[in-house]
């Protein structure tokens, strides 16, 4: 699994293994993130999508029931 880091100089996403940013040449140190953080973002996004879908279904059912 590849880990990425954020360059503190230019803010670009860089492979952590490279140790130097290909954009500005600065040493790479900073926030390390990988599978766990992307999984958390995925779960939050999916929960939001499911919640919004349920709201749309409920509104649709209420609109059809009132007519």
Image (spheres, rainbow, N blue to C red):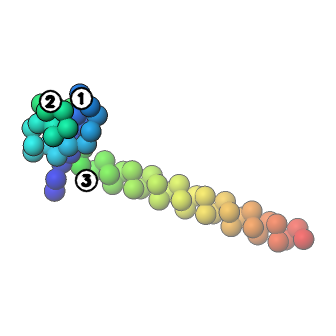
Query: Is residue 31 in view?
Result: no
SS at circle 1: loop
Q: Which mark is residue 26?
A: 2
SS at circle 2: loop
**From the viewer's perspective, is the residue at label 3 or at label 2 nearer?**
2
Residue at horizontal 82%, vertical 66%?
A: 63
Circles 1, 2 touching at the beta carbon (< 8 Å): yes
Image position of 24 with respect to 67: above or below:
above
Q: Count residues near mark 2 (Cα–Cα under 10 Å), then give few for <14, some for 14-19, many for 20+.
A: some
Question: Most extreme residue toward the top, as rendered?
Answer: 9
Q: CA distance from mark 1 to mark 2?
A: 8 Å
Q: Earlier in the sequence, mark 1 or mark 3?
A: 1
Task: Check disc 3 and report the residue beneath it.
Answer: 35
Q: Earlier in the sequence, mark 1 or mark 2?
A: 1
Residue at horizontal 74%, vertical 62%?
A: 59
Q: Quadrant of residue 62?
A: bottom right
**From the viewer's perspective, is the residue at label 1 or at label 3 nearer?**
1
Quarter of the picture containing the N terminus is bottom left
Relative side of 41 to 62, left or right: left
Residue at horizontal 82%, vertical 71%?
A: 64
Circles 3, 2 touching at the beta carbon (< 8 Å): no
Task: Check disc 1 and report the residue beneath it.
Answer: 8
Q: Which mark is residue 41?
A: none
Number of callouts in the render? 3
Q: Count residues near mark 1 (Cα–Cα under 10 Å), then give few for <14, some for 14-19, many for 20+.
A: some
């Amino acid at each position: 699994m590849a880990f990425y880091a954020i360059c503190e100089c230019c803010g670009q996403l860089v492979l952590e293994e490279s140790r130097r940013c290909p954009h500005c040449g600065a040493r790479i140190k900073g926030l390390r993130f990988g599978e766990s953080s992307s999984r958390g973002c995925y779960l939050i996004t999916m929960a939001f999508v499911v919640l919004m879908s349920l709201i749309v279904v409920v509104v649709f059912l209420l609109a059809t029931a009132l007519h």
